[in-house]
Amino acid sequence: MAFGVAKPGPLAESLGSAQGNLSPPHIAGVGDGVAHPIEKDGNDVKPSGPSGEPNCSLANCIGLPIDDIAGREKLSTVEGGHCEPGECDPTVIQSHIVMKRVFKILKILALCLGVLVLALGILLFVTFSGGLPIADGQRLDGVEVVKDGIVSAFIVDIDDHSVALVDAGNDRQAKPILRALARRGLGVEAVKAIFLTHGDRDHTAGVLAFPRAEVMALEPDVALAEGRAVKSLFKHFASPRPNGIKVARPLRNGETLQVGGLGVRVFAVPGHTPGSAAFLARSVLFMGDSAEATKDGKLAAGHWLFTENPALDRASLRQLAARLQPFAVDVKAIACAHSGVLTSGLAPLAELAAGEK
Ligand SMILES: [Zn+2]
């Protein structure tokens, strides 16, 4: 590395003696013939001109006019440095410039990604901050809430030794559900049936942890639950991938099932997905993602951001409220998948439906 105006290199000396002036030192045969060398580490080395201004740049070395490149490339300089002969390697200079451009592009990309992540974080916070928190372990009459991250699964009693699940949670090994069962002295084999409110992965991931359970979902969501179809919101970003889940019994709107001593009524509420279902069992209305419970005890339609057809979802909720009116006394609580349980009967759904008219 050479610094200092007062110490010209050998070529500069020869050029200087030929020109009677040591500055600027030029290297013949590179670029336009007025090229200047650089340090081996790629830094620009600028000898001082008569005015003391650096006047040697990388641009000269590769034969590009400085003015053409100024403003596009802020080439580093070594104050008071001067060019050494043989150090002006066009390949090094070119790679130096390319690397600077690559770093610049990477910086812009990183900035864009950061802004995107921040915006998404704010959006999710705003979306979920108004929801009633999920109370893990909350017990209703014959129903237990299991919090699995951002989503709930529900253990519904069949009898003392067997249970059904409404959804299977977001954990592939179903650890939160297995822990809840273990607290009752039950194991995997106790789960006889799994009712899927819809086919999204955050509700189906734990299904394979219960190989003896009969899996049920409304027919339009069977392919989604089994991974043979992709939710329409993501069809441009993902492709179907079978996940090993097998829906043994496709359900129909309006039917009532009996699993041992447990009766389950099935209602189609398309909107969040085409095959979204609500189930009424043990006096609890399970809504999946078709609705959300708010902190002030109300029920809201499923958030538009995650709902395939928000207008259809709201229409389904109105229809559900009307269908359940004759059984209003049978509904003691409403349980949504991503928020807490409302325990004021059917009223929140009736209010929501009335507001939608
Ligand atoms: Zn969900």
Image (tube, rainbow, N blue to C red):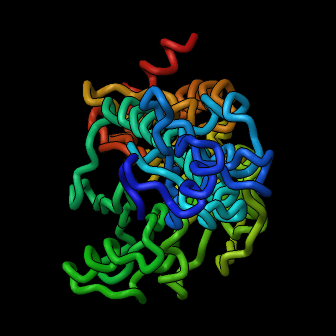
Q: Viewer-proximal residue, 140 or 116? A: 116
Q: Horizontal placement of 184 versus 146: left or right?
A: left
Res 224 visible: yes
Residue drawn at point x = 33 percent, y = 41 percent: 333
Q: Is residue 30 left or right of residue 277?
A: right
Q: Can residue 139 be seen in this view?
A: no
Q: Which residue is drawn at 60% across and 60% down?
A: 11
Total marks in image: 0
Which residue lies at the image location 38% right of the left edge and 80% below the top edge?
Answer: 162
Residue 100 vs 343, above or below: the answer is: below
In depth, the one of 236 and 292 nearer the eye is 236
Q: In which quarter of the image is the N terminus?
A: bottom left
Quadrant in which the C terminus appears:
top right
Which is nearer the eye, 240 or 338? Answer: 240
- From this view, report whether residue 299 is shown above or below residue 102: above
Please provide percent x and percent y for residue 298.
Answer: 34, 25
Q: Position of residue 355 (x, y in %)?
A: 49, 12
Residue 166, position in %: x, y? 46, 61
| Picture quadrant where residue 339 is located | top left
User: Residue 275, relative to residue 74: is it above or below?
Assistant: below
Residue drawn 53% across the image and 87% down it:
212
Taking depth in this image into account, of 252 and 34 the one nearest to the observer is: 34
- In percent of width and height, residue 239 lies at 78, 62
Q: In this view, does 205 lie to the left or right of 66?
A: left
Please say if 302 is above or below 189: above
Q: In this view, does 7 lie to the left or right of 180?
A: right
